[in-house]
Amino acid sequence: MRKYQIIKTRTPMPQQDPHERAHNFSEVALGYTEEMAIKEANRCIQCKTRPCVKGCPVEVPIPEFIAKVAAHDFEGAIDKIKEKNVLPAICGRVCPQETQCEAKCTLGKITGSRPVAIGRLERFVADWEQRVKDIGEFDEGTCVDLSGKTKVAVIGAGPAGLTCAGELAKLDYDVTIFEAFHKTGGVLVYGIPEFRLPKKIVQKEIDNLRECGVKIKLDAVVGKLYTLEDLEEQGYKAFFIGVGAGLPIFLNIPGIELNGVLSANEYLTRVNLMKAYDPSYDTMVDSGKVIAVLGGGNVAMDSARTALRLGAEKVIVVYRRSEKEIPARREEYEHAVEEGIEFHFLRNPTKIIGDEKGFVKEMEVIKMELGEPDASGRRRPIPIPGSEYTISVDLVIMAIGTRANPLLTQNIPNLKLNKWGYIEVNKHMQSSIPNVFAGGDIVTGSATVISAMGAGKEAAKGIHKFLQGKLDDS
Ligand code: FAD
Ligand code: SF4
């Protein structure tokens, strides 16, 4: 039996220099080389209890794929990952591994050192596959023909919808995805910026799905262009709703109507999906000199780092709690700090002030202190009376959260929603309408890529059982 040596030091990830990368949209993390991946894989002690697998929402066989990397069998490693995860190049880059699989790693626990870099290894293996199997442009002719099989409609091409569609195609259903935008990928393409998740990576993962026979209809807003009844008349027997929760929330303070106040959603969509980052495109985007981003999550980090890359002189993140409570992934926060983003903690905006032409000029903020924990378990921020002051800004980006868009859900009679407008589902992801399933952010509210994928996968199982007349709703 192989003896495992404890290697405490985690193999560092090569990355672009912070000063250089703050001015370009190329990927920040450059990925492991083969030697680095094998070295890191050898840190895994192949513990029998495999707690990392339980920490992964889709239960990737982590020790097994890592053992294959250590043995230089990258083909075997990708096959192992794909038993459970159809979008590994994406998950390896954006999953919050530090709170999921890596948080449970035995090596990290017994040695007090950093856990095995599971996400980086997953990314390495997925990139290796894309590199060696690069067969050029997607070719419709390579698709599996599923026509004539039972038809299922998937609404929304984000991670939930894409995963559900991929799983259903594997089960031999004739699946069509209806997507409102002109691009597939959901937040993966319109939210998460190029420097964190290159669009070509997402596109290749989507091409893999299309090769499995999944059809995609773009510019197809269900609830506006088609109702579910229209689709039923076209022969669809079951539905999966994965429309996300992309309706932005604005702070209710004076001045939000001014020119130069916008939601992170609009800002990132203009930059990412409409390519405002590419000088050869004419897409308009405000690129103020001093930009304030409100919020402390991944969306705030992405907006701030995008603003810097678009040429802002100064970018300030204003967050009402302290550094400790910041909800963004630690790595994204640290990257933002390295790139020169300023963080104003324990501050909350109270007013946005405009000039005589109606453009943002200043923002009034109030200092905060932390009280007792609230329902979320985090200490409640409390304003300190009389501590207001103003800062000069010329663009304010609100990244304080999103909620469910009622466009589709309100147009489906008898669809049960909770008080926040999210779809209620049972353990099979089945809604109050038997042939309508749902998952991802439209069920949970804003969450993660991997949880949306996990939901898409569960829903595919539920749809399969339902169509076979074997769904047990106990
Ligand atoms: P979405 O990804 O929102 O996809 C929904 C799709 O449905 C969209 O393509 C939309 O156009 C389409 N649609 C909507 N309405 C209709 C309709 N009526 N008809 C047809 N199509 C419709 N998570 C992480 O795990 N790690 C991260 O680093 C991370 N960073 C993030 C950064 C940003 C800027 C944002 C906004 C989110 C981030 N998240 C991150 C969260 C994660 O992206 C989401 O939880 C995840 O994408 C939800 O997947 P989904 O499939 O439910 O919805
Ligand atoms: Fe390897 Fe850590 Fe998973 Fe154990 S918990 S199998 S050491 S990655």
Image: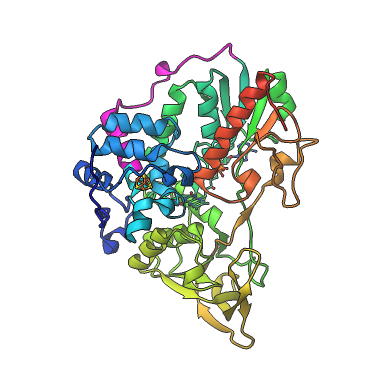
Residue at the image position 51 percent from the left and 39 percent from the top: 159
Quick one: which residue is furthest to the bottom in this view?
386
How far from the left and from the top, in percent, is residue 289?
43, 69
The answer to whether residue 351 is visible is no
Residue 320: name its quadrant.
bottom right
The answer to whether residue 451 is visible is yes
Magenta stretch: includes residue 124: yes
The span picked out in magenta is 122-149
The number of numbered badges drawn on the structure is 0
63 is higher (above) or lower (below) than 419: above
Magenta stretch: includes residue 95: no
Relative placement, left or right, of 307 versus 172 is left
310 or 450: which is nearer to us? 450
The C terminus lies in quadrant: top right
Relative placement, left or right, of 302 versus 379 is left
How far from the left and from the top, in percent, is residue 59?
47, 39
173 or 27: which is nearer to us? 173
Residue at the image position 23 percent from the left and 35 percent from the top: 71
58 or 151: which is nearer to us? 58
